[in-house]
Amino acid sequence: MLTLIGLGLFGLLALVGGGLAVTLRDPVYAVLALVKAMVGLAGIYFLLGAEYIGAMQVIVYAGAILVTFLFVVMLINLSPADIPPLPRGLALYGSIGIALGWMLLLGYALTALMTLPSAQEARPEQDTSLPYLFGTLPPYRQDPLYRLCIPL
Amino acid sequence: MKVELLYAVLTLAGGIFSLGLLGLLLRRNLLLSFLAIELLLNAANLNFIAFSRYHNDPTGAMFVLFGICLAAVEAVIGLALTVRIFRLHEDLGLAKLAQLRW
């Protein structure tokens, strides 16, 4: 339940950030809104148990890629007057078209997911009570060769 | 991870992908199109993480690391091209960039 609430909050952050990034006219503000969306996505990665990926998302995306974007926006001196406004009719019909196509795709995806095997059925031999192991030390750390490489 | 949570995350990823696609189609500026492409890549990464968590299999997380590296490289090359094109044309409107020569 707490995971679902956190998913809603971070998802709202990501969706609002993404929506602002594709609609704001000032490029600097658009890049900053995308930083906000990246931070929201990093929160979702943390919620899903992929802490390493979440940290990489903040460091690489929000820290490196988008700062490079900001640097280029400052370098080429784009002002909001150079950016044409979104075409009004195209925005309306484009939104409707993308929403319809996405709903069609979602229908197919949901029917495919209904027949998806559950996690226990897919990997019955694996003990799912173990914590998520990516980015942590593996359990074979007693192996002598492994101890030779990483003496912990 | 329950399958309802998987549905919620997949729906969210679909929404982010739709936003990115909308921005890519509607923005008539090279730099802002690149921003929308970053959004698309992130929606794909979110799908990978959701299925990786659902199957308790770290292969999806590996793919996401690869994808993040790919996005960084793509952004660097694209931004270098953007600066160069701006020096040549003094403009980043996509309508004027339909031809690569002249």
Image (cartoon, coloured by chain):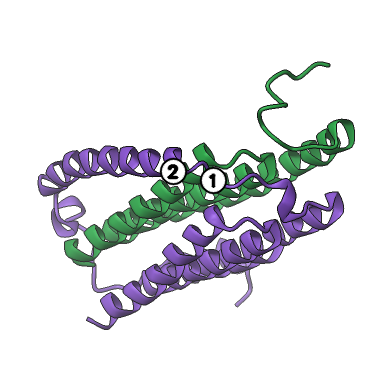
Q: Residue at x 84, y 49 (%)?
A: A76
Whichever of labels 1 and 2 marks the residue nearer the N terminus, that label is: 1
The location of residue A124, given as percent across then percent down, is: 16, 56
With respect to residue A147, does B27 lie above or below? Answer: above
With respect to residue A92, does A130 lie above or below? Answer: below
Letter of the chain that mark 2 sits on in the rendering: A
Q: Left or right: where does residue A88 sit relative to residue A152?
A: left
- Secondary structure type for disc 2: helix
In the foreground, B82 or A150: B82
Q: Mark 2 Cα within 10 Å, few/some/many (few <14, many 20+)?
A: some
Q: Left or right: where does residue A4 sit relative to residue A23?
A: left
- Disc 1 designates what residue? A86
Residues under numbered marks 1 and 2 in contact, where contact means CB atoms less than 8 Å apart: yes
Amino acid found under the numbered disc labelled 2:
Ala
Disc 1 from disc 2: Cα separation: 7 Å
Q: Which chain is purple?
A: A
The mark found on residue A91 in the picture is 2
Q: Which chain is green?
A: B
The location of residue A120, given as percent across then percent down, is: 16, 59
Observer able to see residue A94: yes
In the foreground, B27 or B59: B27
- Asked if labels 1 and 2 share a chain, the reply is yes
